[in-house]
Amino acid sequence: MVTKLSKRAYILLGSLLIFALLPLAIGDNRHLMHLLIMSFIWATVAASWDLIMGYARVYNFGHLAFFGLGGYTSAMLTKVYLGISPWLGILVGGGLAMAIGLLIALPCLRLRGMYVGMVTFAVHIILPLLARAGLAIGTGGSWGIRDLPRLYVGQYIFTTLELVPWYYVALAMFAGFSFVIYKIINSPIGLAFVALRDSEPLAKSLGIDDYRCMFISFGVSAFIGGVCGAFYCHYMGVVDPGIFSLANFLFGFVILMLGGLAAFPGAVIAAFPLVFLNNALLPLLEVRLVILGAIVMGVLLGLPRGIMQIKYLKPLAV
């Protein structure tokens, strides 16, 4: 008899197999390949945001700041200063984003609820101003940093003419980080997140260290966000202050809310249709955000916890 856990395992492995074979069916459709790559990136970003916002219940409204920090760090190290490998730049970008995340966590230790949200959102607002004013230190100012080095394997250099290599790197990043997030959620530290979220006084009376949990949630989510941002910038070949735009923040937040807080993998699932829908609405410019917001409001009125409330869709952890 097949157990419930093994059924989930088969579904997950089957999904990964489908994604792995998908380029064979897509062929030369570069537009569709691009949308899938962006879906992997946004799904990973949203899942890491859910780790801190949904499970740890830390109101981090600056998550997209880590995304941009990772991009700028890797761009400056690979293009402006040291000329290091983009692979190393991506990891260092994630590392610096994690370090900044831990620094931001320090003043948040004595804050709770929306006060943490105000601090983190202030960081998100300040960073594009610093990027524009940082021409002297290599940020490129308003123009940004262009023609970033592409990823390579041996003598083979990734190009925008052949997106299959980018696709598989994005898929590996998506699968790897999703697995890490799943394991954290189902580990003792994940249970500590949920305990603090549901009843902080009771959790602290049982010996759960809320400071430690906040540091871990900030550090892990910031690292994943930074790596995703660095990969995104090398894929696009450019980083500029627009990476911190309100549109990016709102789009990521829409994915998070539609997927459902603390409903992994809801944010992952929601990312794919929303990336395709957002692309279809691009000709409407700013109106697309209004439409996406209206869709989210409509869905949440019927499904307050997001799409994972739909029959047959069950969170892997709560």
Image (cartoon, grey):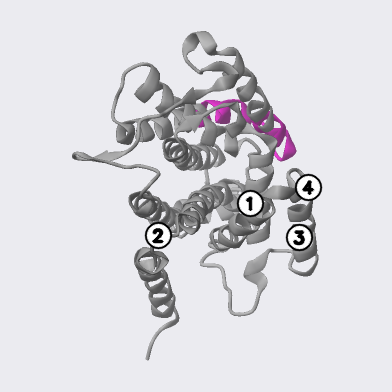
Instruction: From the image, state whether disc 2 or disc 3 is nearer to you.
Output: 2
Density class for disc 1 (Cα within 10 Å; few <14, some 14-19, many ≥20) is some
Amino acid type, mark 4 = Val
What segment carries the magenta color? 101-120
Q: Specify whether residue 59 is in view.
A: no
What residue is disc 1 on? 197
Disc 3: which residue: 295
Please provide percent x and percent y for residue 128: 62, 24
Closer to the camera: disc 1 or disc 3?
A: 3
* Left or right of 294 in this view: 112: left
Give the number of the disc on residue 28: 2
Q: Looking at the image, is mark 4 or mark 1 earlier in the sequence?
A: 1
Q: What element carries label 4?
A: helix
Give above or below for 285 relative to 123.
Answer: below
Which mark sits nearer the N-terminus, 1 or 2? 2
> In front: mark 2 or mark 4?
2
Name the residue at 38% across, 35% down.
90
Q: Quadrant of the N terminus?
A: bottom left
Image coordinates of residue 98 in percent, x first then y, are: 46, 33
